[in-house]
Image: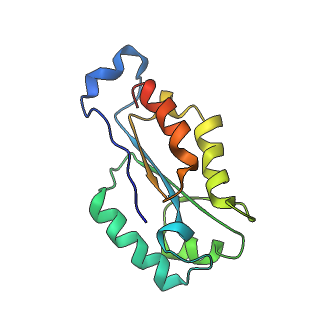
Amino acid sequence: MLRTISGNKDPQRAGARRQFPARRLHLVDIENLADDSLPTLSQVREAQGPYADCLAFGAMDQVEVASSHLTLVNAALGWPHGHYRVRSGPDGADLALLDVLRHENVAGRFMYVAIGSGDHLFAEEAAHLAAQGV
């Protein structure tokens, strides 16, 4: 399932703290988007199409694709040009993406964040980013 979080699109809202061009961070739980814990290469490609149709990728955007170690090869081949995060176990991909939100200065580097997951685990971090103007 695809869920996106969007906010005010006004680029001036971030004020002087922005030193970089407006960019979007895409956080993709490929197993969730493909609706399969072990998606095939074709399922990964099929999941990428609707995601890209909903959220066009900008030249400066960054894509983080997370999966278990069992799905990494299909994720990398099916969704090229991303950064790949691997964590296995229950909610492993979600936890890997939450690490990005919590430890990589997302609010200072990105104007927008798109979360490709159906999990509620992102709600608190998404609210925190929104409070920071992302």
Vertical relation: 22 (above or below) 82: above
User: Residue lying farthest right?
Assistant: 89
Coordinates of residue 108 in the picture (x, y in percent) = 49, 27
- Residue found 54% across the figure and 76% down from its top: 77
For residue 128, above or below residue 64: above
Measured as percent of width and height from the top left, residue 17 is found at 43, 17
Viewer-proximal residue, 130 or 60? 130
Answer with the quarter of the image where residue 110 lies: top left
Q: Nearer the viewer, residue 129 or 111?
A: 129
Q: Position of residue 74 (x, y in %)?
A: 58, 78
Going by the image, does 23 lie left or right of 42? left
Tally the marks.
Answer: 0
Name the residue at the front extreme.
120
> Depth check: 79 or 5 in front?
5
Q: Residue farthest to the top?
A: 16
- Residue 13 pos. (x, y %): 30, 21
Residue located at (27% from left, 28% from top):
11
Please say which color scheme the image uses.
Answer: rainbow
- Compared to residue 24, the image places residue 94 above or below, namely below
Q: Which residue extends farthest left?
A: 10
Residue at (72%, 60%) from the top-left corner? 87
- Asked which quadrant contains residue 57, the reply is bottom left
Kindly indicate the quadrant of the structure image that contains residue 12. Answer: top left
In the displayed structure image, the side of residue 79 where residue 83 appears, left or right: right
Q: In which quadrant is the N terminus drawn?
A: bottom left
Quarter of the rendering occupied by the C terminus: top left
Task: Classify 2 as above or below 113.
Answer: below
| Residue 116 appears left or right of 125 | left
Residue located 35% across and 22% down the image: 14
